[in-house]
Image: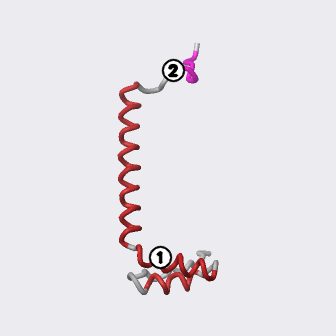
Amino acid sequence: MGRDWTTRSEYSEEISARIDAQVRNIVEHCYEQACKIIEDNRAVIDRLVDLLIEKETIDGEEFRQIVAEYTPVPEKEQYVPKL
């Protein structure tokens, strides 16, 4: 008779706990990085918020111009389809 995969775990509780701990570490690290990015860019975020409250929408080029006033912005890659 075949193995019943719906009722048996494929790995132990210990492995499950280790996986959960690693996932938690990854999520916490990413959260901290996101908070740091927001802190480091708070001035431009506030400027964009004020502009969006006023205008409701901005296009990509306008967004890039505003961000470029605060930090270097990489050149926009042009998509060239390969035939």
Q: Is residue 47 above or below residue 27?
A: below
Q: Which mark is residue 27?
A: none
Q: Quadrant of residue 50?
A: bottom right
Q: Position of residue 9 (x, y in %)?
A: 48, 24
Color scheme of the displayed model: secondary structure
Between the C-alphas of marks 1 and 2, the distance is 52 Å
Left or right of 26, for residue 52: right
Q: Which mark is residue 8?
A: 2
Mark 1 Cα shell of 10 Å, populated few (<14), some (14-19), many (≥20): few
The structure residue drawn at horizontal position 58% and vertical position 23%, both measured from the top left corner, is 6
Q: Position of residue 3 (x, y in %)?
A: 55, 18
In which quadrant of the rendered image does the N terminus lie? top right
Q: Position of residue 43 (x, y in %)?
A: 41, 78
Left or right of 68, for residue 51: right
Which marked residue is nearer to the observer: mark 1 or mark 2?
A: 1
| Stretch of the chain drawn in magenta | 2-8
Residue under label 1:
46
Q: Amino acid at mark 1?
A: Asp
Of the image marks 1 and 2, the number of the one nearer the N terminus: 2
The structure residue drawn at horizontal position 39% and vertical position 62%, both measured from the top left corner, is 35
Mark 2 Cα shell of 10 Å, populated few (<14), some (14-19), many (≥20): few
**Residue 7 counted in the magenta span:** yes
State the predominant SS element of the stretch in magenta: loop
- Mark 2 residue element: loop
Q: Amino acid at mark 2?
A: Arg
- Mark 1 residue element: helix
In which quadrant of the rendered image does the C terminus lie? bottom right
Extreme residue toward the top, this view: 1
Nearer to me, 79 or 70 = 70
Left or right of 43, for residue 49: right
Q: Quadrant of residue 4?
A: top right
